[in-house]
Image (cartoon, rainbow, N blue to C red):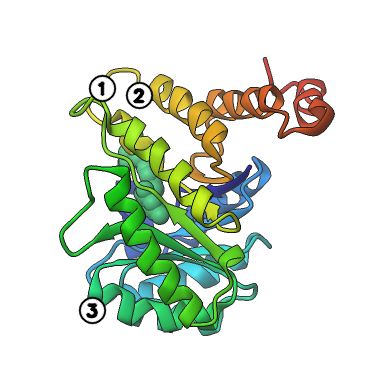
Amino acid sequence: MKIIGEKLNGTRKQVKEAILSRDAAFIQKLAADQAAAGAHWIDVNAGTAAEREPEDLVWLVETVQAAVTRPLCLDSANPAALAAALPRVKQAPLINSISGEAARLAGVLPLAAQARGGVIALAMDDTGIPATAEGRLAIVRRLIEATRGAGIPDEQVYVDPLVLTVGASGDAARVTLATVRAVKAEFPHVHFTSGLSNVSFGLPVRSLINRAFLTLMLEAGLDTAILDPLDRELRKAMLAAEAVLGIDRHCLNYTRAYRAGLLE
Ligand code: THG
C-alpha cells in the first residue's frame, strides 16, 4: 500500500501558524520526517482563507519541494489555489480532490486532467455523503464518466469512499467497505484511498479503531491511504495485514521491517 503523508494540513494549529509566519524549517522537517517514514506522496493543504489560499499553497509547495523529492498531493477544493500551485510542482501531483459537487467538479476536473498524476474522487455530491454503498456507487459512476470524458484513465483515479464515525452509526465502516467492493467490481482498474481517521471521531483510543479499520479496508481493496506515516503502530498494523493478505510477496516488507527494528 502506498501512503499519502497527511501532516502538512493547515487545519492543524501548528501547521497553520507555520504557514502564516512562513516558517520554512518547521514545514520542511514535517515533510522530511514523513518521507523518511515511507510516505510516497506528501499531502499539502494550506487550509487558509480562499483569497489567500493560492499564495499560501504556492509557498507550501515550493517549501516542501526544497526539502523532499516525493510527489505532492495537492489537497484543496479551491480551483484558484490548485491552478496557482500546478505550474510550480516538479513531479506530476495527485489532485485531492474532485467530488460530485457541481462547482467543484467543473472547477477542479480540467486541472486534474492537466496535472497527469492522478485525481482523488470523493463519493459525495451537493446533497452530501449518501448513507448507503449503492448511493456512493452511483456518484462514483458519474465521476468516472466525467474523468473518462476528460481523458483521465481509470488507473489514475483514486476513489475515496469516505467514512463517517462508527461512534454515531454502527454501519458507518461497513458502508465504506461495501462501497470499495462495489466500485472495484464495476471499475477494476481504479485505485482506492481513504482518510481513515474519521472512522474513530469521538471515541477513546482512536488509533486502535483506525488500525482495525485499516486492516479491513486493505482486505476490501484499499491500496493507498492518507495517514500519519510517523504513527508506528498504524504502520505495524499495515505491514501485518499486508503479510496476512498475501499482498506483501513472501512477507518481504514485513521481514525487512523486522530486521530494521520497526516492529518492536
Ligand atoms: N479524504 C481525502 N482528503 C482528506 C481527507 C479525507 N484530506 C484531509 C483529511 N481527510 C486527511 N488529513 C488529515 C490531516 C491531519 C489530521 C487528520 C487528517 C490530524 N488529525 C488530528 C487527530 O485526528 O488527532 C487532529 C488535528 C491536529 O493534530 O491538530 O492530524 O478523508 N481525500
Instruction: Report whether residue 205 is seen.
Output: yes
Q: State the SS at label 1.
A: loop
Which is nearer the eye, 47 or 161? 161
* Mark 1 Cα-neighbour bin, 10 Å: few <14, some 14–19, many ≥20: some
Quadrant position of residue 168? top left
Q: Is residue 247 left or right of residue 214?
A: right
Which is nearer the eye, 257 or 189? 189
Given the image, on which type of amino acid does mark 1 rest?
Leu
User: Alpha-carbon distance for marks 1 and 2?
Assistant: 6 Å
Instruction: Report whether residue 21 is seen.
Output: no
Which label is found at residue 65? none
Q: State the SS at label 2.
A: helix
Residue ID for mark 1:
203
Depth check, mark 3 against mark 1: the one in front is 1
Tally the marks: 3
Instruction: Decide if ligand 1 comes within 8 Å of the CB at mark 3.
Output: no
User: Alpha-carbon distance for marks 2 and 3?
Assistant: 34 Å
At x 27%, y 57%, the residue is 124
Residue ID for mark 3:
51
Name the N-terminal-most of marks 3 and 1. Answer: 3
Residue ID for mark 2:
206
Name the N-terminal-most of marks 2 and 3. Answer: 3
Horizontal and vertical percent for residue 183?
A: 46, 51
Q: Where ligand 1 lies, by quadrant?
A: top left
Given the image, on which type of amino acid does mark 2 rest?
Arg
Horizontal and vertical percent for residue 99?
A: 33, 65
Q: Where does the N terminus fall, quadrant-wise?
A: top right
Q: Residue furthest top?
A: 264
Q: Where does the C terminus fall, quadrant-wise?
A: top right
Is residue 98 depicted above or below 3 in this figure? Answer: below
Given the image, on which type of amino acid does mark 3 rest?
Glu
Q: Is residue 236 left or right of residue 201?
A: right
